[in-house]
Image: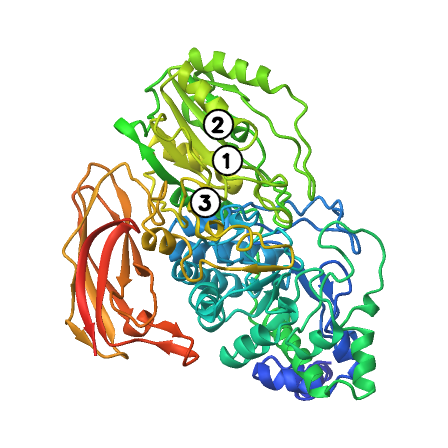
């Protein structure tokens, strides 16, 4: 019996080895991905290749069932993993196990000025996507903050291309380390929601290359993003989802992108252009973005039967089809069919901790007269909390970033937990309507009654925290519609004035993804910019308000005093929002602080600005030498000292000025930053490496980057309008 058993075992082992030897190359996990891709491609029919290139449901596309190649499952969004929706409708599928962790919006992440947190963010949200078996995470968004009216600014990383570049790379690396593809969006020039589906953007090559493309380039070349999403708008007469210049020439040729170009949902308009101009995977066609329901034939997508028919008739080169299929296969082998793909986890304590930490570091203290904050536990017996945003869900709404969450700690929850229920009294103060996509519905509550009740509460309190700002309603921070003005909505300015008359000890806490006008700025003693802070919003905000955490966030975009001070609005409607057909970026390269500095306009609060509960000193700025060639690296050195009494962090920011140049240049441009954490009295030496090549401007006459020889001024400060050190260096 023993010999028979050994024979059976040996035979089984031989069969296993033999089966492994006969595995097709594309299934052999020991083979390089490119070999596997080419082998799979050679085994596929033309029909199977075409079927890879278009959707089969709202959020998925086909694999190759005959060969065991799985489907591609995409999912919103950049701040949390969207609930499961019905196969062919936008409505929720009614699952009970798809409630996610809400992470802070990307404006908050950017305000942290901490790339290490960006890596943590990417890994954490990647794990949630992986747990839900997603192939592609539809994010991060890195469109430039051009106007404070843009409804989707809260999804992006601010106004500066360098800051966006440094923050997006670790996010992508974090997501993809979990075996989920990041899909960087929206490529490119989708800087408003008004007329987003068709507006044709016109701008100079300098503005394109210096302002609007650098973060995408970093995402591709440094972050190694596995997918990228085209934008809805047109650029120079072609829609961005099939734009020859953007996709073929810049992305795939110049930047060597080897991933998948995915259309935004409903962003495809032509089979010819989709085939020839660089699109790989078509999603959402025949819907109008987010509102159409019902059945429609996926087989009639532009890259479906019309593409197949054109291939068979010889109209389209088979090489174009092979390139698209090859890219999609590469994505699948990098994700679902990767042997080393880790497991995910969902709504874990680690993710809650990550969300809280990111929120804490992103909160920005804008004003703090007479050390109003922190309000330590026990300092006041009666604290009035007033404002709808103190107790309103700010994870619902906003368009594609709307989330179904496992939990959400509101600011009111956090403050009650911190100070005790007996010491906190709440009044609504103002009210907005429900969050609706594509339309606005006002509140049915009486505004005067709400205000009067809030005033009575404020009169009877020792201190008042007004918690307002924007929300995710249409015409606020929401996809599909821009804001109508820079002002706070829902009568908040009037309410703040009334509260100050009732109680001068009133601070303003703004939760928003955009700048707002502040007619009351000189009257209030303290202001906090709090963003959309996710599941741990209340905990993080209470941590900062109480002083358990020292605020260290810095503004990732400028706050103008009035809308006309913003470069996009200075030139009138043709610059924003356009004439409904065309739009001209007349401010050119002068976006954000570049505009304010160069035009000598004082902002309400500058890019890079943010206060602390302690104080810091930036020591003497020095460089390793005074003269450099164009291919060298400048080694910059200085000290940062905590001169106050609390542990905290300062963000040292290094800008450069080119005083004499053949083309107009901004007064300064951010080229390096470092977040430094220090105990009271502690000093650290900071060293930064800055490439001379990064001083280049895009030379339209040469169609290339150009560093002109001459003097450059390095400028060190803790915001774009607070420079404390300058150093001249020379480039030969």
Does residue 414 appear anywhere in the picture? yes
Label 3: how many residues lie within 10 Å, few (<14), some (14-19) or many (20+)?
few
Considering only vertical position in the picture, is 572 above or below 382?
A: below
Residue at position x 44%, y 38% in the image: 530
Residue at position x 31%, y 70% in the image: 695
Q: Position of residue 469 (x, y in %)?
A: 50, 34
Q: CA distance from mark 3 to mark 2?
A: 19 Å
Q: Reading the chain from its start, which is encountered first: label 1 or label 2?
A: 1
Q: Reading the chain from its start, which is encountered first: label 3 or label 1?
A: 1
Considering only vertical position in the picture, is 343 above or below 605?
A: below
Q: Are marks 1 and 2 in contact (CB under 8 Å)?
A: yes
Q: State the mark number for residue 487.
A: 1
| Quadrant of the frame with the C terminus | bottom left
Report the mark closest to the observer, 3 or 2: 3
Tell me where residue 706 sits by quadrant.
Answer: bottom left
Q: Reading the chain from its start, which is encountered first: label 3 or label 2?
A: 2
Q: Position of residue 211 (x, y in %)?
A: 44, 63
Residue at position x 66%, y 27% in the image: 443
The residue labelled by disc 3 is 564
Q: Secondary structure at mark 2?
A: helix
Considering only vertical position in the picture, is 421 above or below 548?
A: above
Q: CA distance from mark 3 to mark 1?
A: 13 Å
Q: State the mark number for residue 648.
A: none
Give the camera-side residue of 465 and 656: 656
| Quadrant of the frame with the N terminus | bottom right
Asked whether, in this view, residue 699 is left or right of residue 348, the answer is: left
Tell me where residue 272 sits by quadrant.
Answer: bottom right
Q: CA distance from mark 1 to mark 2?
A: 8 Å
Asked whether, in this view, residue 570 is left or right of residue 338, the answer is: left
Give the camera-side residue of 293 and 504: 504
The residue labelled by disc 2 is 493
């Amino acid at each position: 019996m023993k010999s028979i058993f050994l024979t059976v075992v040996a035979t089984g082992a031989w069969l296993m080895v033999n089966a492994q030897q006969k595995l097709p190359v594309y299934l052999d996990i020991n083979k390089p991905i490119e070999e596997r891709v080419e082998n799979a491609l050679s085994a596929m029919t033309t029909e199977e290749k075409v079927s890879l290139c278009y959707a089969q449901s709202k959020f998925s596309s086909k694999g190759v069932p005959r060969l065991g190649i799985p489907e591609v499952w995409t999912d919103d969004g950049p701040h949390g993993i969207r609930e499961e929706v019905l196969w062919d409708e936008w409505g929720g599928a009614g699952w009970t196990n798809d409630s996610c962790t809400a992470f802070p919006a990307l404006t908050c992440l950017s305000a942290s000025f901490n790339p290490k947190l960006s890596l943590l963010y990417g890994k954490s949200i990647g794990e949630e996507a992986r747990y839900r078996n997603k192939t592609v995470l539809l994010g991060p968004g890195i469109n430039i903050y051009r106007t404070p009216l843009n409804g989707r600014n809260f999804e992006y990383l601010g106004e500066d291309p360098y800051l966006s570049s440094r923050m997006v790379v670790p996010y992508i690396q974090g997501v993809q380390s979990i075996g989920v593809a990041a899909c960087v969006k929206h490529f490119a020039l989708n800087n408003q929601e008004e007329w987003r589906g068709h507006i044709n953007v016109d701008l100079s090559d300098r503005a394109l290359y210096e302002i609007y493309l650098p973060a995408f380039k970093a995402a591709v070349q440094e972050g190694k993003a596995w997918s990228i999403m085209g934008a809805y708008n047109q650029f120079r007469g072609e829609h961005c989802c099939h734009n020859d210049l953007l996709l073929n020439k810049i992305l795939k040729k110049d930047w060597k992108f080897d991933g998948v170009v995915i259309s935004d949902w409903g962003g495809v308009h032509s089979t010819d252009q989709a085939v020839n101009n660089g699109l790989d995977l078509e999603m959402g066609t025949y819907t109008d973005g987010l509102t159409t329901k019902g059945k429609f034939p996926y087989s009639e997508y532009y890259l479906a039967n019309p593409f197949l028919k054109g291939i068979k008739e010889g109209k389209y080169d088979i090489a174009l089809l092979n390139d698209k299929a090859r890219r999609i296969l590469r994505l699948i082998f990098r994700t679902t069919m990767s042997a080393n793909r880790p497991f995910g986890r969902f709504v874990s304590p680690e993710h809650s901790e990550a969300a809280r930490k990111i929120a804490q570091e992103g909160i920005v203290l804008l004003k703090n007269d007479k050390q109003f904050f922190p309000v330590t536990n026990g300092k006041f017996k009666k604290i009035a909390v007033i404002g709808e945003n103190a107790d309103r869900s700010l994870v619902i709404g906003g368009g594609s970033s709307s989330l179904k969450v496992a939990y959400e700690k509101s600011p009111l929850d956090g403050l009650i937990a911190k100070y005790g229920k007996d010491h906190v009294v709440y009044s609504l103060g103002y009210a907005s309507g429900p969050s609706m996509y594509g339309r606005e519905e006002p509140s049915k509550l009486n505004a005067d009654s709400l205000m009067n009740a809030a005033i009575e509460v404020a009169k009877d309190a020792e201190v008042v925290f007004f918690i307002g700002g924007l929300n995710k309603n249409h015409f606020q921070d929401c996809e599909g519609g821009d804001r109508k003005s820079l002002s706070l909505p829902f009568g908040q300015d009037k309410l703040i004035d009334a509260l100050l008359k009732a109680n001068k000890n009133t601070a303003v806490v703004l939760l928003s993804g955009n700048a707002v006008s502040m007619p009351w700025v000189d009257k209030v003693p303290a202001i906090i910019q709090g963003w959309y802070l996710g599941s741990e919003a209340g905990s993080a905000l209470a941590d900062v308000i109480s002083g358990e955490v020292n605020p260290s966030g810095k503004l990732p975009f400028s706050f103008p005093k009035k809308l006309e001070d913003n470069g996009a609005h200075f030139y009138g409607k043709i610059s924003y929002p356009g004439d409904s057909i065309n739009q001209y970026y007349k401010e050119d390269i002068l976006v954000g602080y570049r505009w304010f500095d160069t035009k000598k306009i004082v902002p309400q609060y500058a890019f890079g600005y943010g206060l602390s509960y302690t104080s810091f000193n930036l020591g003497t700025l020095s460089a390793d030498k005074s003269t450099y060639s164009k291919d060298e690296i400048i080694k910059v050195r200085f000290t940062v000292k905590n001169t106050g009494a609390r542990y905290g962090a300062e963000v040292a920011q290094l800008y450069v000025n080119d005083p004499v140049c053949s083309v107009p240049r901004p007064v300064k441009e951010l080229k390096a930053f470092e977040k430094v954490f220090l105990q009271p009295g502690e000093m650290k030496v900071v060293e930064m490496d800055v490439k001379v090549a990064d001083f280049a401007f895009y030379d339209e006459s040469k169609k290339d980057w150009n560093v002109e020889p001459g003097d450059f001024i390095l400028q060190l400060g803790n915001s774009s309008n607070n420079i404390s050190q300058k150093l001249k260096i020379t480039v030969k």
